[in-house]
Image (cartoon, rainbow, N blue to C red):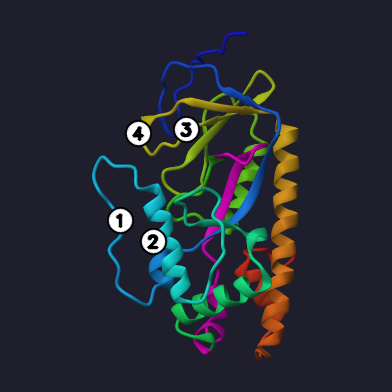
């Protein structure tokens, strides 16, 4: 069945001719943390870049070496060359060392505990992966673990015209068509929006529920580590803040 070109203008970009989206029936949404290499490096290094040359493997090595400076080894990103790591990929030791580095980068534990009203949160977001583990959508610049609420809203979208789904910038958009939610390619304001993926809303809702469960388990792991540090604060609340889980979550 051909897609309706629609009469309403896009709210976040220009209308473009529709192409058949790739239908996804088996996929997952996973919470990920961003480990920016400069945060972990203790030595000056040149980022590997040569115009026109694929240096993915060199970038991967650069990232791993920077993490090694802070005693973190053996982490596997969601794809080669990425700075994103699934929260379930961390061992307890890796996670504790990661937290030490992040707290130091924030000015130290005392600084963090003295300004909890600003709700410190770990940098990350949510990635959509195929059944085989291929990364289809990943968080972009300025994404957050709080963005799960955006995915929840997208799963309820039944509008026939594009609605923004913030995953950072560039972002994606969704619309409802022929009993499926259509996910767009990445775009920004006043740029073309094109169909990319099609999913059943109930499948997306289930993937979101699974991601939320992973995030809550992650918060419990954070709590266990923070309890070891004997911090003079509400550890449960701090762990939830770091994982961007609402107080009532």
Would you say residue 248 is visible in this rendering?
yes
Label 4 vs label 2, nearer the camera: 2
Who comes first in sequence, dot 4 or dot 1? 1
Q: Residues within 10 Å of mark 2 (few under 14, many from 20)?
A: some
Classify residue 83 as left or right of residue 203: left
Q: Disc 1 to disc 2, how far (Cα)? A: 7 Å
Q: Range of the magenta residues? A: 110-135
Label 3 vs label 4, nearer the camera: 3
Residue in the foreground of this view, choosing between 19 and 71: 71
Residue 211 versus residue 6 in the image, above or below: below
- Secondary structure at badge 2 equals helix
Place residue 13 in its image quadrant: top left
List the residue tagged with mark 1.
Answer: 48
Q: Tell me what residue is drawn at x 60 percent, y 71 percent.
A: 94
List the residue tagged with mark 4.
Answer: 190
In which quadrant will I find the C terminus?
Answer: bottom right
Any magenta on residue 88? no
Would you say residue 236 is visible in this rendering?
no
Who comes first in sequence, dot 4 or dot 2? 2
């Amino acid at each position: 069945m051909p897609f309706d070109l629609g009469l309403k203008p896009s709210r976040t970009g220009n209308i473009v001719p529709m192409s058949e989206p790739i239908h996804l029936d088996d996929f997952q949404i996973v919470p990920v943390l961003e480990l920016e290499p400069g945060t972990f490096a203790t030595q000056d290094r040149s980022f590997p870049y040569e115009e026109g040359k694929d240096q993915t493997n060199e970038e991967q090595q650069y990232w791993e070496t920077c993490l090694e400076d802070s005693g973190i080894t053996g982490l596997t990103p969601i794809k080669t060359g990425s700075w994103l790591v699934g929260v379930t990929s961390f061992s307890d030791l890796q996670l504790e060392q990661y937290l030490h580095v992040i707290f130091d980068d924030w000015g130290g534990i005392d600084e963090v505990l003295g300004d909890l009203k600003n709700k410190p949160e770990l940098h990350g977001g949510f990635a959509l992966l195929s059944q085989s583990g291929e990364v289809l959508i990943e968080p972009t610049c300025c994404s957050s673990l709080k963005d799960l609420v955006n995915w929840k809203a997208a799963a309820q979208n039944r509008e026939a015209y594009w609605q923004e789904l913030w995953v950072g910038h560039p972002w994606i958009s969704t619309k409802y068509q022929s009993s499926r939610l259509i996910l767009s390619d990445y775009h920004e304001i006043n740029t073309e929006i094109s169909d990319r993926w099609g999913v059943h809303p109930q499948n997306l809702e289930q993937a979101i529920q699974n991601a939320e469960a992973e995030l809550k388990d992650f918060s419990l792991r954070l709590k266990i580590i923070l309890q070891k540090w004997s911090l003079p604060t509400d550890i449960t609340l701090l762990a939830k803040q770091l994982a961007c889980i609402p107080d009532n979550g």
